[in-house]
Image (tube, rainbow, N blue to C red):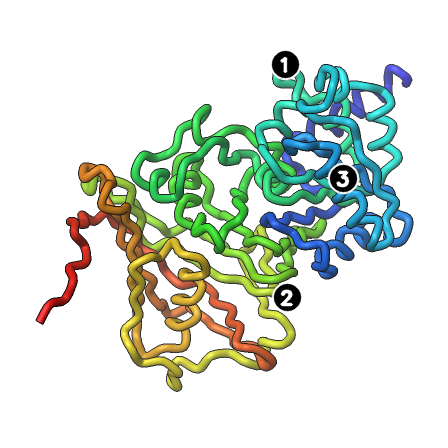
Amino acid sequence: MTRLLRPLLCLVLTLASLGAHADGSLVIVGGALRADNGAVWQRIVDLAGGKGARIAVVPAAAGNPTGSGGRVVQHLNNYGAQAFLLPLAPRLPGDVHVAANDPANVAAVQGATGVYFIGGDQARITGALRNADGANSKVLDAIWALYHRGGVVAGASAGAAIMSSTMFDNAGTTLSVLQNGVNDGRELAPGLGFIGKDVFVDQHLIVRGRFARMLPAMLKKKYKRGLGIDENTAVVVGPGRDAEVIGYKGAIWFDLANATVDPALGAFNIANASISYLDHGDHVNLDTGAMTPSSDKVEGKVDPGKPGNRAPLFSADILGNTTLVDLMSQLVDSAQLQATGLAFGGPDANPALPGFSFQLRRANDTEGYESATSEAYSVYRMRLDVKPVKVSWPAITAYRK
């Protein structure tokens, strides 16, 4: 390489590491991607160039890199790719940092048009792809170069967590995150930042009620926008920062631009957070926040003057599987203006730690869209307030005549 080209290449890679917009695409999978989810697998292959696309599968996060990585290679190949396993994982023999700078592995990524990070422990991915001094390994630089020249970078679960510049690492339950907060070096760690520095990403979102743990992390790191993706679902981010939801369920989009916190309450709280649920086929622009419903919903805008639901809306377990989305879907098509949910520990929980009240509110700019072919809803720009509450036990007393 000439002396003139070397500084230019370094500049390009530096811009990449800073999260500059790329010509490539991201496919961010919320985890538990099934082998028969053709919408997601085929999109990855198509974005990598279609039939015969060379896709490097990085098994760094896995407890069983060869087994788990081999299965992902087979799934991609079933949809037309020529995927291959990149031998780069802490649980493979040899020094992972040597592997991350091995010219053969670098050349393999340079010859690919896609990269796929499998699930497991996200800290293993960042630990493997960054050198001991924190600098990018040569393989990581090659992945950034692939992304900037128009390739696809995909990942599921742990492979989704690394997409933002901050990721969860060794966090406890969602309730414990609300009660105890988050700190760098403990619950939070640096991600790889492919999506840029302005959007926080989390995964296993709706099934595990993790939408709530996104809020303390976003406030701590001063993110205004957050994207949480459910299992067996992906968000595809194109070069223009348009993001499309595909797959089984959907994604949560947070906008905290107008949210406030009351320090006097002492525990975690937030008011006026904007929360949206994007269903399969919906789009959101990561720069502007503009949202567009899927083609089967575009004619099904909910008329607030003709509500389908009238009963009060309440849940004793807002962190339960799909509970949040169910409440949002009911509220957007309701005569009620708000819905309330609770999150609290069991009878053995520390009584000094609070539970939390979640209040969803319809606002003037709230919109809902109902599918013409199913009972699915898209819900845009509801407001969410979260406050600490005390819950005394027994919370439920048996009824006796």
Q: Nearer the viewer, residue 287 or 179?
A: 179
Q: Residue at x 70, y 52 (%)?
A: 238
Query: Badge 1: few (under 14), some or many (20 or more) residues near its Cα, within 10 Å?
Result: few
Specify the quadrant that holds the N terminus: top right
- The amino acid on which the numbered mark 3 sits, given as a three-letter code, is Val
Mark 2 is on which residue type? Gly
Name the residue that disc number 3 marks.
Answer: 115
Q: Is residue 282 visible?
A: yes
Using the image, tell me which numbered label, if any, was put on residue 132.
Answer: 1
> Dividing the picture into quarters, in which one does residue 153 lie?
top right
Q: Is residue 144 visible?
A: no
* Lower position in the chain sequence, tag 2 or tag 3: 3
Where residue 271 is drawn, which disc sits there?
Answer: none
Query: At which x and y percent is residue 80?
Result: 86, 53
Looking at marks 1 and 3 on the same chain, the residue that comes earlier in the sequence is marked by 3
Residue in the picture at 73% in, 48% down: 25
**Number of residues whose C-alpha sits closer than 10 Å to that of mark 3, classed few (under 14), some (14–19) or many (20 or more):** many
> What whole-number distance in Å separates the C-alpha atoms at marks 1 and 3?
23 Å
Q: CA distance from mark 2 to mark 3?
A: 24 Å
Hey, which quadrant is residue 396 in on the image?
Answer: bottom left
Q: Position of residue 105 (x, y in %)?
A: 83, 25
| SS of the residue under disc 2 | loop
- Position of residue 136 relative to residue 34, above or below, is above
Above or below 285: residue 375: below
Q: Which residue is mark 2?
A: 281
Q: Which amino acid type is shown beneath numbered disc 1?
A: Ala
Residue 5, x across and y down, in percent: 86, 22
Q: Is disc 3 placed on a helix, strand or loop? A: strand
Name the side, left or right, on which 401 lies relative to 240.
left
